[in-house]
C-alpha cells in the first residue's frame, strides 16, 4: 500500500501556533506531512529559507511523520516529485478564500490529479498571520500566545537589527 503523503506549502515567515496546529492535525490524517518552505524571490521575507526551515524543525520536533524541506519553482511539480497527490492549505478567514480558491483552480488546471485540502486552524488561531505577528513584534508586543518562545526571541532580535 502506498504511503499517504501530504504537502503543506508556505512561506512560514515566521511560523505561528496556527501553522503548528495545522501540522499536528494533518500528521494525524496522513502517513507523512512534508512542510515545504517556499523559496519565493517575489516575497519580502524577514528570515532566510535556511532559518525558516530550522525554526520549523525546532517547532515540529516532537510530531511524528513530519518532514521539513524547502522548495523552489512550481508547487505542483514539487508535489509530484514527492510522490504526493495532496496539498494542504490553511483557511483562516473569508478574506483568504478568494486567493486560495484562485490558486487551487490554477493548480487543478496544471495538475488535475493533485487535490487541495483546506484546513481551518483552531478558533483561537483564526486571526493569526505571519504579517500581523511581524507588525506586533516590531511594536514590542508580547507574542507568547502567538508563536513559540524561541521564534519570538529570534523575531525580535531580527527586527532590532533591521531597524538600526
Image: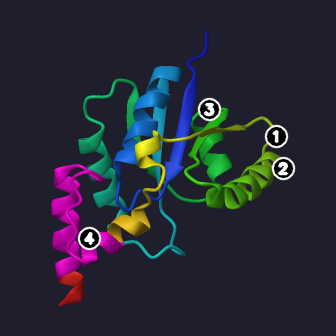
Taking depth in this image into account, of 26 and 40 the one nearest to the observer is 26
Element under label 1? loop
Q: Is residue 27 among what the camera can see? A: yes
Task: For marks 2 and 3, give the CA distance.
Answer: 17 Å
Task: For marks 3 and 4, give the CA distance.
Answer: 36 Å
Task: For marks 2 and 4, give the CA distance.
Answer: 39 Å
- Measuring from the top left, give residue 15's x and y in whole percent: 35, 53
Q: Where is 16 relative to 129, above or below? A: above
Element under label 4? helix
- Measuring from the top left, give residue 95's x and y in whole percent: 64, 61
- Measuring from the top left, give residue 26's x and y in whole percent: 49, 30
| Residue bearing the label numbered 3 | 84
Mark closest to the chain's N terminus, 2 or 4: 2
Task: For marks 2 and 1, give the CA distance.
Answer: 6 Å
Query: Residue at coordinates 32% horizontally, 47% vertically from top-left?
Result: 56
For the image, the number of numbered tags is 4
Element under label 3? loop
Number of other residues with Cα within 10 Å of mark 1, as a class: few under 14, some 14 to 19, many 20 or more:
few
Number of other residues with Cα within 10 Å of mark 3, as a class: few under 14, some 14 to 19, many 20 or more:
many
Instruction: Answer whether residue 137 is magenta in the image.
Output: yes
Segment tinted magenta in the rendering: 135-160
Number of other residues with Cα within 10 Å of mark 4, as a class: few under 14, some 14 to 19, many 20 or more:
some
| Residue bearing the label numbered 2 | 109
- Residue 137: give its label: 4
Callouts 2 and 3 close, C-beta under 8 Å: no
Element under label 2? helix
Amino acid at each position: 500500500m502506498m504511503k499517504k503523503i501530504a504537502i503543506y506549502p508556505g512561506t512560514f515567515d515566521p511560523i505561528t501556533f496556527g501553522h503548528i496546529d495545522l501540522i499536528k492535525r494533518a500528521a494525524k490524517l496522513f502517513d507523512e506531512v512534508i512542510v515545504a518552505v517556499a523559496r519565493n524571490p517575489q516575497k519580502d521575507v524577514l528570515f532566510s529559507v535556511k532559518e525558516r526551515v530550522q525554526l520549523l524543525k525546532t517547532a515540529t520536533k516532537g510530531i511524528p511523520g513530519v518532514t521539513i524541506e524547502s522548495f523552489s519553482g512550481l508547487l505542483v511539480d514539487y508535489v509530484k516529485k514527492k510522490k504526493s497527490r495532496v496539498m494542504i492549505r490553511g483557511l483562516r478567514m473569508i478574506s483568504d478564500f478568494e486567493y486560495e480558491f484562485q490558486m487551487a483552480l490554477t493548480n487543478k488546471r496544471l495538475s488535475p490529479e493533485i487535490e487541495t485540502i483546506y484546513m481551518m486552524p483552531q478558533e483561537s488561531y483564526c486571526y493569526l498571520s505571519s504579517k500581523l505577528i511581524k507588525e506586533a513584534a516590531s511594536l514590542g508586543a508580547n507574542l507568547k500566545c502567538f508563536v513559540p518562545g524561541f521564534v519570538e526571541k529570534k523575531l525580535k532580535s531580527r527586527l532590532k537589527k533591521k531597524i538600526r
